[in-house]
Structures are given as structure tokens and as C-alpha cells.
Image (cartoon, rainbow, N blue to C red):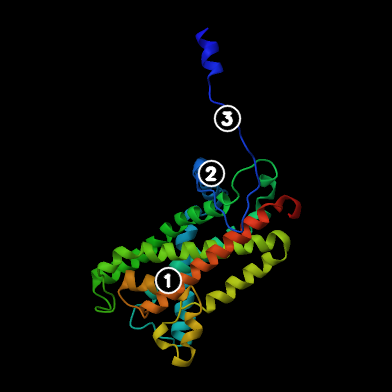
């Protein structure tokens, strides 16, 4: 009798399934509920990246060192491009930190719909989880790439070589901020590229070409102080210029960037992020039919 009474007096409820309306509407609660899936996708990305490789995670140490050596030979010795008194290895390795993280994010997350179409067609989950997992998993590679940079930094500090060219200040503790800047920027670009490649798959090749051209427009192997005044606006229009220079300011105590440039770059990154979210949400409704 008590059981029947409790059943009869239970409050009625209903589950309503409705399409998402509006050009930008994020269901933060749903994303939080799928946090376990985010962790599994991050684990999948990390394991698959190192699986069946010769050196495994060491590639993320060897690659920036070899790239820095090539930059030092071509741009430092042959082209004679200065590094503002900063030792060449530190200058190039510091510039590559933010750029490598950015390029890895855009290369992988920029084809989220195409590379994960088999997964999207089988089960429902917030599609935004996939590019977010890429952004998070690439932080592992970023942490590994910090090792050769800190090794060279420790060498110059202990031996006293190039004394005065590198300064460790309180800004050293702020280096996660430009990392967050790069993460937001790369997420926005990745979402835009994902929406575009879902409909036009050949844009994946344009994605790779864009990253190559973008690298030469970023102050990785040249200092901003050597850019002619007439062309400074071109450099500042590149949203990756500011975070690249902020990494040098935080980690090496040297750099050329002001408040207005930082504000413009951050605002541009947020605009790209909002535009990317809107385009991504619009495409995900019919993504199964287009990929």
C-alpha cells in the first residue's frame, strides 16, 4: 500500500528533445557531463601519436632542436638575421614553443569532422568535445618541448655565457597566459577550418599550405625590433605575433610588444573563436550527410 501511494504521488516529468536554436548557443552543462569522454579522447590522441614510433615522445625533443639548428644556419649564419642579443638556440626554441603548439592544433583539429566521421555517425555526443580533446592532448607535446628549451636556458644561466642577454624576472610565472592565448586562437581557427573542410574536403590541403605561409609571417626566426616601421602593421595583423613575442618576454625577459598590440591580438582571437563556434555549430547539424 505504501509503495502504491509513493508511485501515485510521484511528480510527473517529461524529457523534451528539441533542436538547438540560435546562431551561437553552447550547452555548458552537456559539455561538463561528457568530461569523461573528453578524458578518453585525450588519452586516445596521446597513445595513438606515440604508437608504433621509433623514438616515441623523443620526437618532440628532437624536432625543435633540429629546426632550431636549421634556423641558426640559414637565418643566423647565411642570412645574417640578428636575434636581439639573445643566444640563437634560445631565440629559436622560444619562438617555436607557441608556434608548434598552434600548428599542431590547427592541423589536427582543423579536420575534426572528416577524421571522425565514423565516430559521429555511430553515437551522439557534443561534437565540440573532439577539437577540445585535440587542444588538450597537444599540451603534452608542448610540455615535452619545454625540456630542450629549459636545458639550453639552464646552460646559459649556469655558465654565464651571453651574460645580460637573458633575464629571469617575475614575468616568468606568467608564461601560461600566452599559452592560453594560443589555445584560444588555435581553437577558433580549427573550428572554422573544421566547418569548411566538412563541406569542401580539398580545403584540408589548403589548411597545410596556410600553416606553412603563416609560419614565415610569424616572428619565429626574426626579432620584431628589426621590422621596418612601414611594415610593422603587417606584423601586428598576424594574431600569432603577439603571443610569440610574449613567450620571449615571459621566459627570456626580452621582447617588443605593447599593450595596444596585446589587446588587439586577444580581441582578434576571441572574435575568431566566436565565429568558429558559430560555424562549427551550424555545420554539425548536417555533418553526417556531408562527410
Nearest to viewer (mark 3 / mark 1): 3
Whole-percent x, y for residue 30 in the image = 53, 44
Residue at which label 1 appears:
243
Task: Please tell me which residue is depicted at 61% across the width and 64% down the height of the picture.
Answer: 192
Determine contact: label 1, label 2, CB under 8 Å: no
Nearest to viewer (mark 1 / mark 2): 2
Crowding at mark 2 (Cα within 10 Å: few <14, some 14-19, many 20+): few
Decide which of 58, 97 is in the foreground and name it: 97
Nearest to viewer (mark 3 / mark 2): 3
Indicate the secondary structure of the residue bearing disc 3. Answer: loop
Mark 3 or mark 2, earlier in chain = 3
Whole-percent x, y for residue 186 in the image = 52, 64
Residue at which label 3 appears:
13
Mark 1 or mark 2, earlier in chain = 2
Left or right: where 282 falls relative to 147: right
Decide which of 86, 185 is in the foreground and name it: 185
Amino acid at each position: 500500500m505504501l509503495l502504491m501511494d509513493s508511485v501515485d504521488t510521484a511528480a510527473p516529468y517529461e524529457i523534451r528533445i528539441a533542436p538547438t536554436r540560435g546562431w551561437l548557443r553552447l550547452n555548458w552543462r552537456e559539455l561538463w557531463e561528457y568530461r569523461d569522454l573528453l578524458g578518453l579522447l585525450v588519452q586516445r590522441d596521446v597513445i595513438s601519436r606515440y604508437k608504433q614510433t621509433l623514438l616515441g615522445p623523443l620526437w618532440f625533443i628532437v624536432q625543435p632542436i633540429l629546426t632550431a639548428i636549421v634556423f641558426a644556419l640559414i637565418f643566423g649564419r647565411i642570412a645574417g638575421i640578428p636575434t636581439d642579443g639573445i643566444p640563437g638556440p634560445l631565440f629559436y626554441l622560444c619562438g617555436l614553443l607557441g608556434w608548434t603548439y598552434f600548428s599542431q592544433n590547427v592541423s589536427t583539429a582543423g579536420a575534426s569532422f572528416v577524421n571522425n566521421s565514423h565516430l559521429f555517425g555511430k553515437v551522439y555526443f557534443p561534437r565540440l568535445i573532439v577539437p577540445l580533446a585535440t587542444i588538450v592532448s597537444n599540451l603534452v607535446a608542448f610540455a615535452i618541448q619545454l625540456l630542450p628549451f629549459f636545458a639550453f636556458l639552464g646552460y646559459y644561466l649556469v655558465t654565464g655565457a651571453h651574460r645580460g642577454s637573458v633575464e629571469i624576472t617575475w614575468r616568468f610565472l606568467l608564461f601560461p597566459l600566452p599559452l592560453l592565448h594560443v589555445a584560444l586562437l588555435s581553437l577558433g581557427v580549427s573550428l572554422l577550418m573544421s566547418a569548411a573542410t566538412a563541406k569542401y574536403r580539398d580545403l584540408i590541403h589548403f589548411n597545410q599550405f596556410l600553416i606553412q605561409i603563416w609560419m614565415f609571417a610569424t616572428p619565429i626566426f626574426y626579432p620584431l625590433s628589426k621590422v621596418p616601421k612601414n611594415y610593422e602593421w603587417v606584423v601586428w595583423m598576424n594574431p600569432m605575433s603577439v603571443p610569440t613575442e610574449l613567450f620571449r618576454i615571459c621566459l627570456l625577459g626580452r621582447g617588443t610588444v605593447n599593450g595596444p598590440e596585446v589587446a588587439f591580438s586577444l580581441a582578434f582571437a576571441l572574435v575568431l573563436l566566436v565565429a568558429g563556434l558559430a560555424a562549427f555549430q551550424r555545420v554539425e547539424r548536417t555533418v553526417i550527410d556531408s562527410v
